[in-house]
Amino acid sequence: MFRKSMVFLLVLTMLLGLPSGAYAEECVPEKEGYVLDFSTEFNDGNLNTEYWLPQYLPHCTANTAGSAARYKIENGCLNLYITKDSPDYFGGQPGSADPDNLLWIANGIQTWEKNHLHPGGAQQREVEPYEGYATQYGYFEIRMKMPDTGGGGYASWWLIGTQDDAAPDGTGSVQNGEIDVLETFFKSPGVFEPKVHAWDDPNLYEWASRVELDGDPSDYVNEFHTYAMDWRPEGITFYVDGKEVAQTMESPQYRMCMILSMYINSDFSGWDEPENNYPIEWLIDYVRVYKDKNGYDESNRLTKFERFIKDMCDSLTAFWHRVLSYFQDFCPQCRQFFERLLSKIPALYRTTNSNISKS
């Protein structure tokens, strides 16, 4: 009976077309032209630790309490949060005179971990490798509410290279680029920034954009919205609620893992602790990754020369638009000036003629 049940479930899974890697927790909506590769829906009340490590870059700090994730899963959502008494990531203390011992709070979960992962953090202790989920290319989507608590800090959904080319001791990798799908600052919920950081990758260039969201910023705090990126060999396209908002012409050429994290007193957002309203909460409904049914063609990637030509064309186009915009603004002003001048000519003629008559 058990064997028949297992066969039935296997056949049902094949008919439904669920991912063979078992990354999907449950059935999720199909996306036209894509197949589901990874899904965390947060509906069962527990974090799936088979694919998510409840720590934030633990190899970068000797303070285990500071790297441990602080979260709740309730009402079908992941709630990453920071409270007034959250431990410092490095073990620092408020008011320290030592700049390396200042209060710095980080909280997050990630799908991959190993020694020397991510060049932005220095190795502080040895850790056991963790391999949850990593992939190359795909349509990545998150449904979430923006944190809005004021003060310094930000939340980020980002990807980093798994550094499969590293030496046995974990060093020497150039496959360590970074994609920031979004960085949203607590004091500016109506804005987010997608970015690409090259780090040691010689084939990547630094890239950043600033996206101002449509409508009232409070809507992105009070309601769920989707944020996504379509990562392909030829570049990355970023979306909000299905609308394209930014694009880059290049992309990493290797596997990457995901990190969901939030920070206070980071170097990027400043320290405005007195303005923060605790708890600082980030609500996430789901995280999904889809793959193009037709695969990914590496020949679509631009060469450095092609990228240079496209950059030049884009710069010239942008310059031409600025010139047109200037003259569109300038010409009406000129027309208004001459209209006012001409309107004064009859009065000027009458005044001059009157003065001549009197003389």
Image: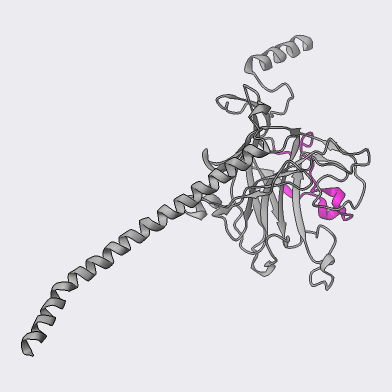
In the rendered view, how is the structure colored? one colour
47 falls in the magenta region = yes
Screen quadrant of the C terminus:
bottom left
Residue 126, x across and y down, in percent? 92, 46
For the point 73% across and 38% down, the residue is 46
Majority secondary structure of magenta residues: loop
Q: Look at the image and give the residue range highlighted in magenta.
A: 45-71
| Left or right for 90, reference 264 | right
Location of residue 23 (image quadrant): top right
Where is 25 relative to 313, above or below? above
Residue 335, x across and y down, in percent? 27, 62
Where is 133 relative to 330, above or below? above
Screen quadrant of the N terminus:
top right
For the point 62% across and 21% down, the residue is 294
Q: Nearer the viewer, residue 334 or 126?
A: 334
319 falls in the magenta region = no
Query: How many dots with numbers?
Result: 0
Where is 24 relative to 284, above or below? above
Q: Report whether residue 75 is seen.
A: no
For the point 83% across and 44% down, the residue is 117
Outermost residue toward the left?
357
Q: Nearer the viewer, residue 77 or 53?
A: 53
Q: Nearer the viewer, residue 235 or 9?
A: 235
Q: Report whether residue 3 is seen.
A: yes
Location of residue 101 (image quadrant): bottom right
| Left or right for 120, reference 274 | right
| Left or right for 291, reference 318 | right
Outermost residue toward the bottom?
359
